[in-house]
Image: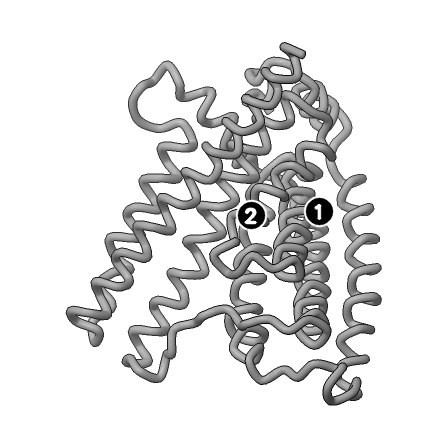
Amino acid sequence: MLNFLTRTLRTFKAGLLGFGIALLAGGVWAGLYVANLKTTPRIPWAVIPMAFYLWGMWRYLGGKGWPRSTSQARRTYLRARPVTARTFGWSLLAGALGVAALAGLWIVLFQLVKMPGNVLPDPTQYPLLTMAFFAVMGSLVSPLAEEAGLRGYCQVMLEREFRGPIAVLISSVFFAFGHVNHGLLWPKLLVYFLAGLMFGSIAYLSKSILPGIPVHMLGDLTFFTMVWPYDTARRLVWETGADTWFWIHVAQVVMLGALALLAYRRLAKSLDAPVAHAYDAVSVGGGLGVVGNH
């Protein structure tokens, strides 16, 4: 019983820490974003302080700065380990296929379940240059902060308590509920949970959060530009019938999802055996210092 309570507390500690890192960065960007649009919308000055914030955050989480006694632990928890070109390539392919499958799933679910669309700012109300800069910065904030917080610090801590797949599942639950601001609706939470599995699996299989960052950026850009803006115009198949595009999106989910799973299987075989063994030893309770040496 004591062991269960200890594990539970450590699990929630990992989740809160991961959330804290992600939410702090998101909150800073939201504040700068709003202040910029309310004061001088023609000059996208908010991207400059945010870029410095992200740079400082990444350096600190990666072991730089005070206190020096925690540098190695911070570097280990961030898990920003360089990977081989082969591992990076398979991670990117698996992630891109997964993003495309999830985009199709989101569209299908919106035609099966009545839901409000995600609230997006209207870019036509502001200068194009400002919104372009904001889009670029926005595509950096969530991937960097969420990968560092949830797939880095949170998942590494969870991998010390549980086997890798269980740690990925738990971190994905945290990731899904971190998006309840988009609506406490099971179809949306399901997609976010699957996205968490996708990102978490890349981090676990590659032993690094670095390959997941461009995949996360691709996912955000895909949904922000090609999926969410059209949600309010989607019609339920129960009301209008299933048209050709509905079945194309169903096929997109099935076919690209299957290809993504095959790419993930190939990714699992791409890591050098000695490195994988060392990381797997850590994930079931070994010392974190081992990871930092690879």
Q: Nearer the viewer, residue 51 or 271?
A: 51
Q: Which mark is residue 177?
A: 2
The correct choice, above or below, for 7 with respect to 88 in the image is above
Distance in Å between CA atoms under marks 2 and 1 = 33 Å
**In the rendered image, which quarter is residue 108 located in?**
bottom right
Q: Give the position of the N terminus as an image quadrant.
A: top right
Q: Mark 2 or mark 1: which is in front? A: 2
Q: Residue at x 52, y 54 (%)?
A: 180
Image x and y of residue 231, in percent: 57, 77
Q: Residue at x 77, y 57 (%)?
A: 260
State the residue lying farthest toward the left.
Answer: 39
Q: Give the position of the C terminus as an image quadrant.
A: top right
Q: Nearer the viewer, residue 105 or 71?
A: 105
Residue 262 left/right relative to 201: right
Q: Residue at x 76, y 45 (%)?
A: 267
Residue type beneath disc 1: Arg
**In the rendered image, which quarter is residue 277 located in?**
top right
**In the rendered image, which quarter is residue 292 located in?**
top right
Q: Which mark is residue 86?
A: 1
Residue 206 left/right relative to 36: right
Residue 54 left/right relative to 257: left
